[in-house]
Image (tube, rainbow, N blue to C red):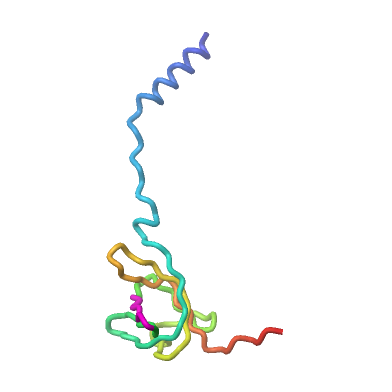
Amino acid sequence: MLALVITVATLSAATNSPPAKPRAAASQTAGRGLPFHGKIAAVDKVAKSITMEGKKQRVFHLTPETKINRDNVKASLDAVTAGVEVGGYARELPDGKLNLVTLNIHTVAAKPAK
């Protein structure tokens, strides 16, 4: 009998609680992920952005959280120059701005396949 009273009290407390507020999805607040690779056309160190070569030149913006690596070693914006082969990962914000998460500079030629 006591177990029945406890069960009923627990169920009624659970059903009387206010509905949970839906959380904003992480992808909505952070933007969708976008891997990229190619050659850098221009570097703007004042605006902290890079422009990629191609038909549609994309501009990527560096943030304080951006991780820059040169040949798998941590580097700074000074290591980024035009004409260098790069790859990385960016987040597209709702306004269309592309923020860099990681930027990997490749100066060592890839090893030939056997």
* Extreme-top residue of the structure: 1
Q: In the rendered image, which quarter is residue 93 located in?
A: bottom left
* Residue at 68% over, 84% down: 113
Q: Position of residue 14 (x, y in %)?
A: 41, 26
* Residue at 39% over, 54% down: 26
* Extreme-front residue of the structure: 55
* Residue at 48% over, 86% down: 85
Instruction: Give yes or no for residue 60 being in the magenta stretch.
Output: yes
Q: The C terminus is located in which quarter? A: bottom right
* Residue at 30% over, 62% down: 94
Nearer-the-camera pick, 17 or 25: 25
Q: Where is residue 98 in the image (x, y as percent from the top left)?
A: 34, 71
Q: In this view, does 48 lie to the left or right of 14?
A: left
Instruction: Give yes or no for residue 34 being in the magenta stretch.
Output: no
Nearer-the-camera pick, 34 or 71: 34
* Extreme-right residue of the structure: 114
Q: In this view, does 105 lie to the left or right of 63?
A: right
Q: In this view, does 102 lie to the left or right of 42?
A: right
Q: Where is residue 95 in the image (x, y as percent from the top left)?
A: 27, 65
Q: How many marks?
A: 0
Above or below, comparing residue 49 to residue 6 in the picture: below
Q: In the rendered image, which quarter is residue 43 located in?
A: bottom left
Magenta-colored span: 55-61
Q: In this view, does 52 lie to the left or right of 71?
A: left
Above or below, comparing residue 16 to residue 55 in the picture: above
